Amino acid sequence: MSPGLLEIYLQLIFIVSLICFSAFFTSSEVALFSLSRLDILRLKEHARKSCRLAANLLQHPRRVLATILIGNEFADIISSAVATVLFVKLFGPEKAWLAFPVMTILLFFFGDLIPKVIAFRKREKAACFLAPFLRVFIMFFSPVRVFLISFSDAFLRLFGLPTRSEVEFSEEDLLQLIEESYQAGLLGEQERRFIYGLLESEKIPVSAIMTPRREIFALEDGPITEELLVKIKRRGVSRIPIYQKNIDDVIGILHVKDLLRWQLQPKPTRLSQLVRPAFFVPEAMKVRTLLEEFQKKRLKFALVVDEYGTIVGLVTLEDILEELFGEIYDEFDIRREPLQEISDEVYRVSARLRIEEFNRLVGAELPTDESETMGGLVLQLFGELPREGESREAFGFKFTVERVKGTRLVSIIVEKLK
């Protein structure tokens, strides 16, 4: 074999090798950076050392990406330069321009497109296989990489742009991780619902989950009597706001268990002698913040006030837990839709259903000027918190209280009068 022919073969082998290097860097980029958060967590716990290495490399994504870009550029530029020299030898200087389209096609198909498709389809296996080789190039290109990253950082700072290399873990990333974990069976439905509720609780104000002022069961300060004890027992509540003159002048919270102690050892004669300090929160406070306050103060009950200090509602730990987990049901609670037609023109209605929505669904014309919810309308009709089974007729309907939980209406039976 003549020296000239040997040189041509060596140049061809060199070009093919550089195309392979280009394919390596391209597939490394796709394999590593197409991994989901769940994939990365899986690789961190993998038995294979190379898989754990792949996950560790992604702890410094900017370093990895810079190495891949440097390697790719070197492979593409040098292969094109060698191809140009080869074409000059084979076809003469006037045909040197052919090297550009030929190398463009070869690099596009064999150095870019095909490796990307394969790496994306087999990203976990590809990441594990390529990671050890990529680490070698990360160390090899270290001087060039450090210089280029420093230069790019200086350029970014010149325009006031951030230079942080860390990947921000956004809420969208977290939601994606939750869904992927749920689909993979790593999270159950209850855990998934809880995490979503916890995220939403950072946005929802207390006013959205509170029991409104109209539905609060509160007592004016006065002497403790047997009749009062019977009334409290009938309500089935554990904590009651005690006020003087009107509900905006709350002097404290009565714990019903303190009344039980009073029955055993009767000493105080007035409710005010048994109350504990009330905890007030603004209606704009977020649910998550209130939960943290409850935990710190070891409380389960708060009164909600507006910007003028007027009491607009109350909120309990149970309200927050229902927001996180969904409605906490017992055997009597409504489990399905807020409005169910249980027979002809007879409806089981959630007390929280808006009157406008009821009117739209049923074709009714209940007034909305005094109350917003069906529960508020019923309280308006009774003038106080009614007992289960009590009923009133108004606006062409019969309203029967089906379920009361503590100081809150839960469900109502609404029957259209003939």
Image (cartoon, rainbow, N blue to C red):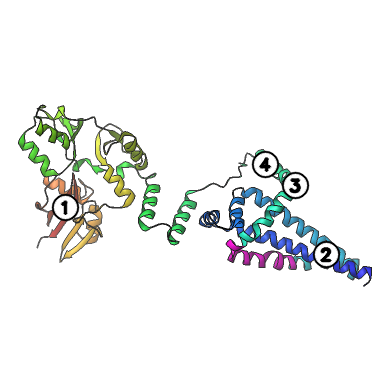
Q: Are marks 1 and 4 in contact (CB under 8 Å)?
A: no
In percent of width and height, residue 191 lies at 37, 54
Residue labelled with disc 4: 153
| Sequence-first tag of 1 and 2 | 2
Q: Residue furthest right?
A: 2
Q: Amino acid at mark 3?
A: Val
Q: Position of residue 263 (x, y in %)?
A: 9, 34
Element type at marker 2? Answer: helix
Horizontal arrangement in the rendering, residue 175 relative to residue 165 (left or right): left
Q: Position of residue 72 (x, y in %)?
A: 72, 57
Residue denoted by label 2: 83
| Residue 355 in picture, x, y percent from top left | 22, 53
Which range is magenta?
106-125
Q: CA distance from mark 3 to mark 1?
A: 73 Å
Name the residue beneath numbered marker 3. Answer: 144
Cα separation between marks 1 and 4: 65 Å
Q: Is residue 118 magenta?
A: yes
Q: Quadrant of residue 274?
A: top left
Q: Residues within 10 Å of mark 3 (few under 14, many from 20)?
A: few
Q: Quadrant of residue 89?
A: bottom right
- Residue 403 is labelled as 1
Quick check: 273 above or below 216?
above
Identify which residue is drawn at 15% across, 45% down: 380
Amino acid type assigned to the residue bearing label 1 in the image:
Arg
Question: Is 368 in front, or is 113?
Answer: 113
Indicate yes or no whether the magenta region holds residue 120.
yes
Q: Amino acid at mark 2?
A: Ala
| Marks 3, 2: nearer the viewer | 3
Q: Nearer the viewer, residue 173 or 311?
A: 173
> In which quadrant will I find the N terminus?
bottom right
Query: For the residue labelled by badge 1, is the local secondary structure a helix, a strand or a loop?
Result: strand
